[in-house]
Amino acid sequence: MSISGLFLVLFLTLHMVLNFTSVFSAEAFQKVCDFMGTPVISIMVPVLAFGFVIHIIYAFILSASNLKSRGGLKRYEVATKTQADSWASKNMIYLGAIVLLGLAIHLTHFWADMQLQEFKGGEAADPNMLLSQTFGSIGITILYLIWFVAIWLHLSHGFWSALQTIGWNNDKWLKRLKVIGIVYVTILMGGFAITAIAACCRAHGLF
């Protein structure tokens, strides 16, 4: 689960950097989207989907195992009391469910009108137009921001926990991993939030 989680963090990082180009240039964002539609990149979609499915399956298996072993206590499995201190660590399964719901909404807003259309032999919608249409709604923008917060909470624990699981689990590195994780995830989700807010402001003619 830790490996699939880190793999998805890497994907989110790439996705954020590419989307962030829309803040500075509509033309650059269009070129990025054209590049994402090339066969070499498109073949990565099922790989990413497989990784995400594996992550979800392991999350539910882990949660079910925890509930059974802890007599029904609803908390995420942790190796030490220190790891259980954060709210996120105790509610990872619920945060994951919110992330999954937000992903489903995101796919209907963008993937269904772009990559899916190309896969079906059609033409992808204009990415800048989709940005304007989606984030032109203040309500939708707020929902996305809430989604980003949920992902931040999920990753703020999951990032360092995954690294700890694969071997960085001594007391000296624990605090460092937590700080590195929080800083990294804050930059990551901050980039997504800025992209959404900028698109909303642009759609309403604020800049």
Image (cartoon, grey):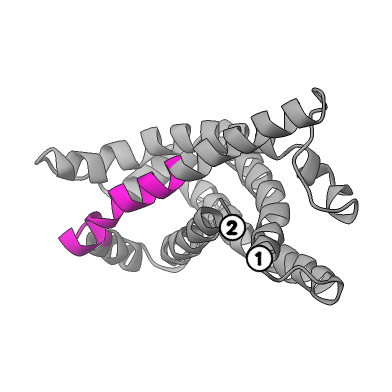
Task: Check the image and report above or below for 29 versus 138.
Answer: below
Left/right of residue 118 with respect to residue 159 in the rendered view: left
Labelled disc at residue 58: none
Q: Amino acid at mark 1?
A: Leu
Q: Quadrant of residue 111?
A: top left
Left/right of residue 67 with respect to residue 123 in the rendered view: right
Q: Amino acid at mark 2?
A: Ile
The answer to if 109 sits in the magenta stretch is: no
- For the point 14% across and 44% down, the residue is 123
Residue placed under numbered mark 2 in the picture = 194
Residue placed under numbered mark 1 in the picture = 163
Where residue 202 sits in the image (x, y, percent)?
A: 49, 52
Q: Quadrant of residue 104?
A: top left
- For the point 55% across and 40% down, the residue is 58
Residues drawn in magenta: 36-53
- For the point 59% across and 57% down, the residue is 194
Disc 1/disc 2 C-alpha distance (Å)? 27 Å
Where residue 35 sits in the image (x, y, percent)?
A: 24, 64
Between 152 and 70, the one nearer to me in the picture? 70
Where residue 93 sits in the image (x, y, percent)?
A: 67, 35
Where residue 66 sits in the image (x, y, percent)?
A: 73, 34
**Which element carries disc 1, helix, strand or loop?**
helix
Task: Check the image and report above or below for 188 versus 115.
Answer: below
Q: Is residue 65 something that shows in the picture? A: yes
- For the point 43% across and 40% down, the residue is 53
Task: Check the image and report above or below for 98 versus 164.
Answer: above
The answer to if 44 sits in the magenta stretch is: yes
Q: Residue furthest top?
A: 72
